[in-house]
Image (tube, rainbow, N blue to C red):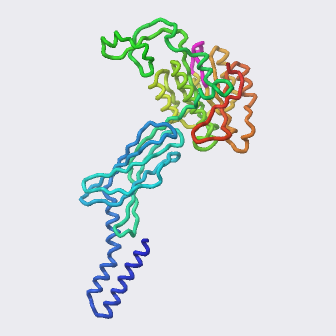
Amino acid sequence: MAHIKVTAIFTTAFFMIAAGTVSNSWQLYYMAAIVLALPAVSLAIGRLSLNGIAVTREADSPIWAEQRTPVTLTLTAAGQWPRLCFEVRDILPRYLHRVEPETPLIDIIVGGSAVARYWIQPEKRGRYQIEHAEISTRDPMGLFTFRKRIRADTELIVYPVPFDLEGIAHSGGPRPHAMMRSTSTYRGSEAEADGVRPYVPGDPLRRIHWKTVARTGDLHVLEFADARAVEVHIVLDCHNGGAVGEGADTAFEYLVRAAAAVAHDAIQKQATVSLAATTEDGDLVERGSGTEHLMAILSALARVEPTQTVRLARHRGVFGTGASHTRSLAVLTADADPEQAQRLAAATAEGLSVTVIWCDSRSFRPETTSRRLMPENYTGRLNAAGVRVISLQRASTHEDSIVPIIPVSHGYS
C-alpha cells in the first residue's frame, strides 16, 4: 500500500509541473513542491511521535508453569499532542509465550495514558526477565513504520508443577510417596502438649489454643513434643548431565518437578523439610514447615539450572549431617555416578533413610528410547545397601502438561 501512495504522490507532482510548464502557471510549481514535501513532513511527525513515551508493566508473580496469566502495559506520553494508532508488544524470553497473536491499536490522549492487556503462558518453570517493550506506529500518511524499544524490567518467577504422586498410587506399581508414608507422622499425634507458639500458615486449625488467642488477640497453636517427627532433606543434583531434552521435556525438569512433589508431600504430612542444590551459589533452603516454607522451596526450585560440571559426590556437606531414625534423605539426580552410590550406601549404613530418585536421561534421546535399563553398577550397589530407588523416564506419549512418574526399580517398601 505504501508504494502505491508514493507512486500517486510523485505522479501528481509530475503532472502539476507539466501543467505549469504548458500553461505558464507558476502557482502549480508551488503546489507540486508542497505535494513532494508531504512524505518528509509525515516522516518527521512519525519520528517525533515516539519521543517522550514511557512504559510500565504489571504481571502476577509467582505463577505456575503452563498457567495463563495477564500482563498489563501502561503507556504514558509527555507533550501536548495526542499519539494515535500505537502498537505495543513485549520482547519475551524463550519459553515464555504470548497467548494472543494480535496486538490491538491504542491511542494516547493529551496528558493521559493508554492500557494494553494480553496473556502469557510459560512453557516451563524458571526465573524470567522481561526487559523491553517495543512500541510501533506509522506516520500520518501511512508510508513508514517506526519502532522503538523501551526499557521496562519485570521479573517473573514460575514455580514448577509437582508430579501427581497420589495419581501413581493406583497404577499397580510401588507408591512413589511410600518414603513419606513409611517414615513421617503428623506432629503431635499420640504426644503431649509441650507449649504454645504463634500460628504458622499450614498448622492444623484443631491445634489453635483459644485461651491464648482470647488473651493476646493473635493466633497461637499448641506445640507438641513428638520424638517421631520427621525431617526430610532434599538434595537436587544440578549436574549438566541432566540437560538432555528440550524445553520442559528434559531430565532435569523431571527432577525439579519430582523434588517439588517430595517437598509438597512431606510438608502435607507435617514433616520438617530442607533443600540443597548443587549450584555455584550453593542454593539452600533451611529446615522449616508449613505453606510459606513450601513456597520458599518452590521459589528456589524455580531458579536452579543444570550448569554444574562437578559431580554430586564431590560436593562437601550437601547431604547434611546427622543420621537418625527420624531423618530422611531424598536425592534427585540424573548422574549414575558409582562414587555417589558409594557415599549414599555409607549414609544408609550409618542409619540414614535414603531414597534416590534417578532420571534416565537416555530416555530423552530418540535414538535410545527403546533401551531404558538403569546402570547395574549404580542401582545394584544402592539396592544392595537398602537404598530406595525410583526411576523417572520420559513418557512414550508425552502430553503438554501431564508427565507421570514411572517407578521401575525394586527395594521400595
Inspect this view and state whether residue 313 appears. no
Q: Position of residue 286 (x, y in %)?
A: 49, 23
Q: Nearer the viewer, residue 387 or 396?
A: 396
Q: Is residue 377 left or right of residue 243?
A: right
Q: Quadrant of the C terminus?
A: top right
Most distant residue in the front direction: 170
Most distant residue in the top direction: 192
- Residue occupying image coordinates x 71% and y 19%: 385
Q: Quadrant of residue 307?
A: top right
Q: Quadrant of residue 403?
A: top right
Q: Position of residue 334 (x, y in %)?
A: 65, 33
Q: Position of residue 278 (x, y in %)?
A: 57, 31
Q: Quadrant of the N terminus?
A: bottom left
- Residue occupying image coordinates x 50% and y 28%: 297
Q: Position of residue 208 (x, y in %)?
A: 40, 14
Inspect this view and state whether residue 190 appears. yes
Q: Magenta region's main secondary structure?
A: loop
Q: Is residue 328 magenta?
A: yes
Q: Is residue 131 magenta?
A: no
Q: How many marks?
A: 0
- Residue occupying image coordinates x 35% and y 56%: 106
User: In this rendering, is residue 266 above or below 257?
Assistant: above
Q: Nearer the viewer, residue 310 or 242?
A: 242
Residue span colored magenta: 320-330
Q: Is residue 189 left or right of residue 36?
A: right
